[in-house]
Image (cartoon, rainbow, N blue to C red):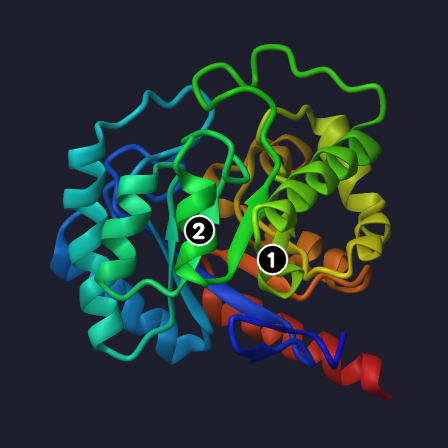
């Protein structure tokens, strides 16, 4: 992975996306960064703690979440993108809507992170191609409102691989260079506990893409289920365990709530691995 880069960053070491949810209803931190000053303070703290990228989202995609109007999403996310960009941060916009992507890019976002792999909005693929920016294509079965009702797979890890392979091919056919693409198997998005564990155990499968893999396991429900029904903010130990298991399988991009702790864990892991 040492020769691979993403968004101008070498992946010789793992890179951390700090999560800035500008929402009232995200599963773990809803309301924590809804006010602009709170979001900027949170972002600055994450940068100081070792975040490489700040991932800003104005629509919750937690299980059961209701859609947010485009104008509301823009009003939430874009001032935060602008403020963090003005601080010198590298900012990704977490959205499935082309107008939000466009507004965020104008405000300084330099990465597009779409939980629907640029498939939800018919304008998003063309916009992403034209932007020239790096993109993250995530797998999600269904939509946030219903995705956990009864997710089904023949073979979870392989089915997700096949879907992402198709989306990468469609992006390339539209004119996007593969060097701009990272993939995310979408832990917790339309997946049961067993589906999540199967994907995490077989992350080596995704090396075949020759694309960086981003993983979002931070505070996810599967950790609570395995870890004694711990509340979301009490899932740090499980989150770090999943991050380190993924790092050992080649993942180099991690989207997390707890930046300082994840950076420390990955730094120690990498120092041991280099010996």
What distance separates the C-alpha of mark 2 from that of mark 1? 11 Å
Mark 2 vs mark 1: give the one in front: 2
Q: Quadrant of the N terminus?
A: bottom right
| Quadrant housing the C terminus | bottom right
Q: Secondary structure at mark 2?
A: helix
Residue 121 in percent (x, y) is at: 41, 31
Q: Is residue 96 left or right of residue 163?
A: left
Q: Is residue 92 above or below residue 171?
A: below
Q: Is residue 100 or residue 206 the one in the foreground?
A: 100
Residue 58 appears in the figure: no
Residue where numbered disc 2 is placed: 128
Spot occupied by residue 69 in the image (x, y as percentages of width and height): 21, 27
Q: Would you name the residue on which mark 1 appears?
A: 181
Which element is circle 1 on? strand
Along the viewing direction, whichever of 149 and 28 lies nearer the viewer: 149
Residue drawn 50% across and 62% down? 134
> In the rendered view, does 225 fall on the left or right side of 256?
right
Among the 4 quarters of the image, the one containing residue 150: top right
Say whether residue 22 is left or right of residue 216.
Answer: left
2 relative to 238 in the view: left or right = right
The residue that appears at 46% across and 77% down in the rendered structure is 50
Residue situated furthest bottom in the rendering: 275
Of residue 217 and residue 15, the one placed in the foreground of this image is: 15
């Amino acid at each position: 992975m040492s020769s691979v880069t993403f968004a101008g960053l070498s992946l010789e070491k793992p890179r951390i996306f700090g999560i800035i949810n500008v929402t009232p209803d995200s599963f773990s931190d809803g309301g924590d960064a809804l006010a602009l000053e709170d979001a900027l303070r949170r972002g600055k703290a994450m940068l100081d703690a070792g975040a490489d990228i700040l991932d800003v989202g104005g629509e919750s995609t937690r299980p059961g979440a209701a859609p947010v109007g485009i104008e509301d999403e823009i009003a939430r996310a874009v001032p935060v993108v602008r403020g963090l960009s003005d601080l010198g941060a590298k900012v990704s916009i977490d959205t499935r809507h082309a107008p939000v992507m466009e507004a965020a890019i104008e405000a300084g976002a330099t990465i597009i992170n779409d939980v629907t792999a640029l498939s939800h909005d018919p304008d998003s693929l063309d916009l992403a191609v034209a932007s020239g920016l790096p993109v993250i294509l995530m797998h999600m079965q269904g939509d946030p409102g219903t995705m956990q009702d009864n997710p089904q797979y023949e073979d979870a890890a392989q089915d997700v691989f096949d879907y992402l392979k198709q989306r990468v091919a469609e992006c390339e056919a539209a004119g996007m260079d593969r060097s701009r693409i990272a993939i995310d198997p979408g832990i917790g998005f339309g997946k049961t506990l067993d589906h999540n564990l199967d994907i995490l155990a077989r992350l080596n499968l995704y090396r075949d893409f020759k694309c960086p893999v981003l993983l979002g396991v931070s505070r996810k429900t599967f950790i609570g289920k395995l870890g004694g029904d711990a509340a979301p903010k009490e899932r740090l130990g499980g989150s770090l365990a999943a991050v380190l298991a993924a790092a050992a399988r080649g993942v180099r991009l991690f989207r997390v709530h707890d930046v300082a702790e994840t950076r420390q864990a990955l730094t120690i892991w990498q120092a041991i691995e280099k010996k």
